[in-house]
Image (cartoon, rainbow, N blue to C red):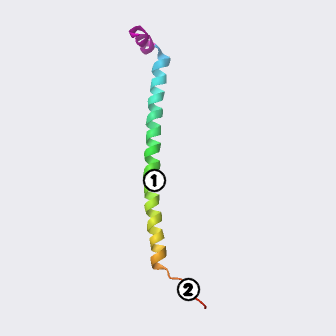
Amino acid sequence: MVEMIKAFSREEDGVALTEYLMLLGLLIGGVILAVTTAGSNLAAAWTSWGTWWTTTLTPPPAGG
């Protein structure tokens, strides 16, 4: 088992694959963080706009 790990570490393909997997993990984490943050901010803005819309504007009188 130890020999397999040593052989894997000497192989350049294994090292390159590990680096790419680490970069992929960081990229996925960054995308998840960005989407979560943008989603929270968008939800807050939408709620604020909806509150303004319903409290500021009044409907026209009925039977005009």
Element type where label 2 sits in the image: loop
Residue 21 horizontal/vertical position (percent): 47, 28
Q: Which residues are magenta?
A: 1-10
Q: Is residue 51 above or below residue 21?
A: below
Q: Earlier in the sequence, mark 2 or mark 1?
A: 1
The image quadrant where one finds the N terminus is top left
Residue 12 horizontal/vertical position (percent): 47, 16
The image quadrant where one finds the C terminus is bottom right
Amino acid type of disc 2? Pro
Residue depth check, mark 2 versus mark 1: number of the one nearer the observer: 2
Q: Which residue is mark 2?
A: 60
- Residue at position x 48%, y 33% from top? 24
Residue 22 horizontal/vertical position (percent): 44, 30
Q: Is residue 51 above or below residue 25?
A: below
Q: Is residue 60 magenta?
A: no
Q: Is residue 5 magenta?
A: yes
Q: Which residue is mark 1?
A: 38
Marks 2/1: CA distance?
A: 36 Å
- Residue at position x 45%, y 24% from top? 18
Indicate which disc residue 21 carries: none
- Residue at position x 48%, y 28% from top? 20
Element type where label 1 sits in the image: helix
- Residue at position x 46%, y 79% from top? 56
- In-front residue for pair 15/64: 64
